[in-house]
Image (cartoon, coloured by chain):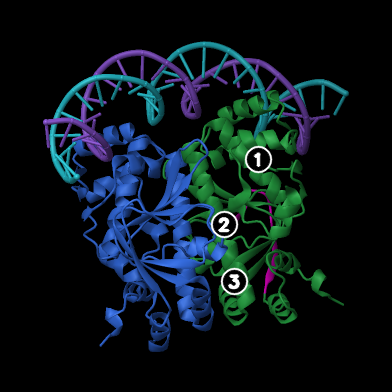
Chain colours: A green, B blue, C purple, D cyan
Amino acid sequence: MTTATDSPLAPMLKKLNARETLNAADQAAVLALPYSLRTIPAHGYIVREGDVATHSCLLRSGFAYRQKTLRDGRRQICSIHLSGDMVDLQNSLLRVADHGVQALSDIAVAYIPREAVLEVAFTHRAVGEAMWYDTLIDAAIFREWMANIGQRSAVVRLAHLLCEFGLRFEAAGLGERDSFTLPMSQEQLGDCTGLTSVHVNRMLRVLRERGLVAITKGAVRIVDWAQLARAGDFTRGYLHLPAEQRAAAD
Amino acid sequence: MTTATDSPLAPMLKKLNARETLNAADQAAVLALPYSLRTIPAHGYIVREGDVATHSCLLRSGFAYRQKTLRDGRRQICSIHLSGDMVDLQNSLLRVADHGVQALSDIAVAYIPREAVLEVAFTHRAVGEAMWYDTLIDAAIFREWMANIGQRSAVVRLAHLLCEFGLRFEAAGLGERDSFTLPMSQEQLGDCTGLTSVHVNRMLRVLRERGLVAITKGAVRIVDWAQLARAGDFTRGYLHLPAEQRAAAD
DNA sequence: CGCTCAGTTGAACCCGCTCAAGCTGCGTGG
DNA sequence: CCACGCAGCTTGAGCGGGTTCAACTGAGCG
């Protein structure tokens, strides 16, 4: 037998429930969404820039990222996504993808037809609100990254990014905010922050030497959270984390 | 007597209709939204960072911008908004503002209670979709700006920005794509692009000397659109402009 | 007429980039 | 078992795009 928590869509429910618990009918409607499962190896594409996206994609496990590639080959990573995220409402609702979405690690996904997503959103208001909010939070993170890249110096940018990851990993139940596993190369960190991998390397060393973080093979340990947050000019507001977690964490 | 086009909310209808024409009932529902009118002088605030936003704001005339201010006083402008834009769905739906919204010029706005916006969105699906799309397009622009700031050199950034403004002004009926009035200082252009006003000045000179643009007191003339687009690594896809305009303009 | 604010230009500095080499760990195949 | 290749990390040296600081100009306005 299959209970709600067994469904491949369960991670989606967890995410949607985070803000405000959905009632039984809403939850049932979400679990009743049609889907097809797939696994994608690290570096594989979920959507390519320019594709016409017909499905939204729920990230069931692993990590993914959004990315824009420029004509000269440089690329900007726009955001990182954790399991439970609806990773491509952005592209699928707008239809033609203005950015690519790729697997950071090996991932398991569930594709849900665009029309079905819209249908459940507008027949179950609480679900629709939760999904809309999700896309708005994505946008809030885009804005913060824009400010990060545009206005802060290299060390500060990296410190900020690590703080964000800490809180988001914790909120997703993937670690503690001061101890989590980040499957990203220094080059990818550079693509998030508008820096070269060489400079990322040097600035991470600075953070290490200041006794703020210790990173070994993707395992991030934030030694002094308060100091790192200060060094990264980090305030959590833009993440719009649910209230309980916000209260619990400070 | 008051006809539909007389309503202060008419600019909103125009925007919502751009993608897909709303039926009469949907349009009536939009025009029936409760609102209060106000005017705000240039530099005045629509929302301050940290405020709890209870109203969404329709920009009826003039220009506004979103902005994040950092602890050290530096600031990042995240987007520019033209008349007709619902300028603060982002903040009002998320409730506590993670960024400020300010008047670029003197503006006229209509405040609409958050709850009324949500109500019409979920009782009139076409309206809800149009508003959701609007917020997604905002997000697409955020991503492009992120890539612009993170990956492109100063001249290219500015050329890109001017191309974007051209198309958006044209789409909003505020000018031609190669001739429009931009009420922004060079300092503000710098805040959009992560550059100093001094460097903006020099790079605009480069664009002028290359015969690409001519800017005099806010009046932008794009002398050679094709070359500027090339110089700015500009492709219009991310703006997700309605199809007719896309077809008409190329 | 003097204030302020935006634009303009110059000169020196520095943050982050580029290029390049060496290093480490790991999987593969001999 | 070592040899090899590869990918990511590390470190050095030199360069350059953009900043900083500062002075000057010109337009708008009380």
The chain carrying label 3 is: A
Of residue A73 and residue B179, the one placed in the foreground of this image is B179
Does residue B85 sit above or below B231 in this rendering?
below
Q: Which badge, 2 or 1, is on the more N-terminal residue?
A: 2
User: Which three-letter amino acid code belongs to the residue tagged 2?
Assistant: Asp
Distance between the alpha carbons at the discs numbered 3 and 2 = 14 Å
Q: Which badge, 1 or 3, is on the more N-terminal residue?
A: 3
Q: Are marks 2 and 1 in contact (CB under 8 Å)?
A: no
Distance between the alpha carbons at the discs numbered 1 and 3 = 29 Å
Q: Secondary structure at mark 3?
A: helix
> Do the residues indicated by labels 2 and 1 lie within the same chain of the protein?
yes
User: Which three-letter amino acid code belongs to the residue tagged 1?
Assistant: Leu
> Do the residues indicated by labels 1 and 3 lie within the same chain of the protein?
yes
Residue A193, given in percent of the width and then of the height, sits at 54, 39
Does residue A197 sit above or below B28 in this rendering?
above
Which segment did they paint magenta?
Answer: A35-45
Circle number at residue A162: 1
Can you tell which quarter of the image residue B106 is in? Answer: bottom left
